[in-house]
Image (spheres, rainbow, N blue to C red):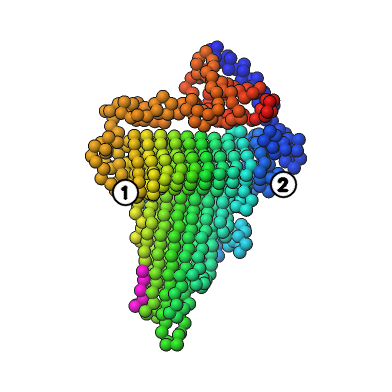
Amino acid sequence: MSSAARRFLVISSVAVLALSALLSVPAEDLCAVTAEGDGSAVDPFRIDSAEDLRRIGTGNMGMDKHYVQTADIIFPDDAGPRIQVSAVRGPQDTVFEVGAKIPSGLCATMQANEYIASCQGGPEYLRFTIPNNVFLDESLVSIAYTGLPGVNEDVSDNAWSVSFVYMQKDSGSFTLPTRGNFSPIGDRDNPFTGTYDGAGFRIGGIRVMDYRNGDSFSGLFGYADGAVIRNVFLDGSGSVFSSNSFYQSSTKTLGESRTRISSAGSICAYAVGTLIENCSSGCTVSSVIIDISKTESLSNGNQYQNTVRMESFAGGIAGSAEDCVIKSSSFSGAVTSLIFDEKSLVFTPVSGGTGQKIFQLRMHQSGRSCLGGIAGITTGSELIFCYNDSDAISGNRFFSENITESTDLGGSSIDIHIEFECSRGGIAGFSEGDKIIGCRNSGEVFGEEQGMMDTSGLSAGTSLSFKHLGSQNSGGIAGMMSATEVRDCLNTGQIGRSGYTNFQKSPYPPHRIGGISGTTDGPNVTIRNCFSDSGSAKRPGGGVVGVSLGSLTLSGTYFTSSGLRIISDRDLQEDIDKTMLWRIDEPFRSKADWDFDRMWTVDNENKPRLHLRYNLVFDYLYPDMSIEVDGSSGSGFSVSAPAVSFRISHSADPDSYYILRQGSKETVVPPFREMISLTPDTDRPGQ
């Protein structure tokens, strides 16, 4: 054993005992833990069980208090409602039978990668038939029924959802839980404003679900405002599901307007002015909006105009982040967003004084779906040193317009206007006024819009106008950028995955695919010192940007796909394309003016890779921290700083060790321990 290793063993034993004494608390009911914390910054409430975690949101400890997790928390696989799903694979299709019945007139939805299917209720069990060519070797499948929420926007007791990974070769039956075991901490009316430090302990088996007949926010924290959330680790056994559904049997109000939001993020669904740092998650995150309603024209020459707007946000860490900082956080699960919009247009003849039956109906549907590996939508925020390795970032929308009871409508008019934006990104779906720095995506980003218009009920002489506007934006870092600065970011994930059939049945918005951003719009978008090692598939895209609609500044940015332009819709000068196209025979270190001392390295294929050094991370994230190299091997260091929490990366040196000091407290960290947390030092003057 080397001298460094012997020293490590001696110091680590002392440090582990000291740290255990500092953080250990009995597993007691939080109502009786006044001696184990008072919720202040120097004496936070201790959280060490699932019941403790639930009581933050439902108890009387307060949304503005300080909390620290002191043990792994594993939610039991309880005996709650479960559902059986069977899969029978045939030559062309796979039939899924779900052991549940739902009322007639309502429906359940199923999403398998890009493909969306629905099943109407009735006396039989639910059955979904899915073409085999939509599946990968491993595919995320989600089935949801949102029940009949009450008029007071209560959670529906009838709602349920299941998510599972389906192997293409699988057949047989399996049983899955259908309900959640945790309600989000904080909502719009009572947001979480305190501090939660997970201290690197694990939370496993959590199933967060929020079903609403109104805005829904689902995550460990549902709504946070001015909060601090750090060192939270949700493992891959967890799931987060947000559903906003509205069913209306008849809508006859002139000029009615509806807007609905569903937001899901494993750490926080909706964050405002909040710091999220050193958090990681492997959960499945899903946001669903379902609108199944009848829009009825009951007029004689009058015009009825109804407006429906739906917004679905889903992110691996945060669903929506406004004026936030998200740093040193990672995601490895799956993110899906589904907007399911199926309407019946009902025309009931009413005789006028002339006997004519003339009807005019205008339906304007608009909305957006924003989903990303770290955040679904970000505005005025900073995303720093974050990493997405998600299995899938998949956003989909299905719409169906059915015209019924529409006999004898000669001279009537129907005007349907759909304007829908879907933005998917490896880091952020939609980014406006942000800084995205030192972030890396290696996950796949894809999605599709499907729809149909059933006009079989129209009589001769009826005028139908159908417009479908909007866009589908997919990017390695962000789907859509506006007034955003992106620098020192890397994408190695595939954008716009290939290998499946397009099931589109109606005109659809254009796809905009780019290695860094699908679309840049508005003023002052800057992409600097970025690298995309991924070509777009299925549809032509841009090596860096799919479509640029505003002012865009590119510098020091490169891509590997020789068959693509740097921007798909723009012919740049030939020498610019050649300059920004990576070539294996050109030494990249001498070609790019990048920070190879602290930020980047070059692999054995001459491709740049992010390789953040400790001095960069500490200097950028913790400018008040002092760093000293310690240990004869030269591979360790000690830290003296105010209260800090940060991540230690893996080391190739088996004898390396890291000594972290804060005042009188000291701990030694093995090289493969990823999460480090230091609590405030009450022994120091002024603390």
For the C terminus, give its image quadrant.
Answer: top right
Residue type at numbered disc 1: Arg
- Report the predominant secondary structure element of the magenta stretch: strand
The location of residue 221, given as percent across then percent down, is 59, 45
Q: Residue at x 36, y 69 (%)?
A: 465
In the picture of the structure, the residue carrying the numbered disc 1 is: 539
In this view, the residue in front, 72 or 560, is 560
First-in-chain label (1 vs 2): 2
Residue type at numbered disc 2: Asn
The location of residue 336, given as percent across then percent down, is 47, 49
Question: Measured along the vertical axis of the image, is residue 182 above or below residue 611?
Answer: below
- Picture quadrant of residue 70: top right
**For the residue labelled by badge 2, is the local secondary structure a helix, a strand or a loop?**
loop
For the N terminus, give its image quadrant.
Answer: top right
Please state the extent of the stretch shown in magenta in the rendering.
Answer: 461-465
Q: Residue at x 53, y 26 (%)?
A: 672
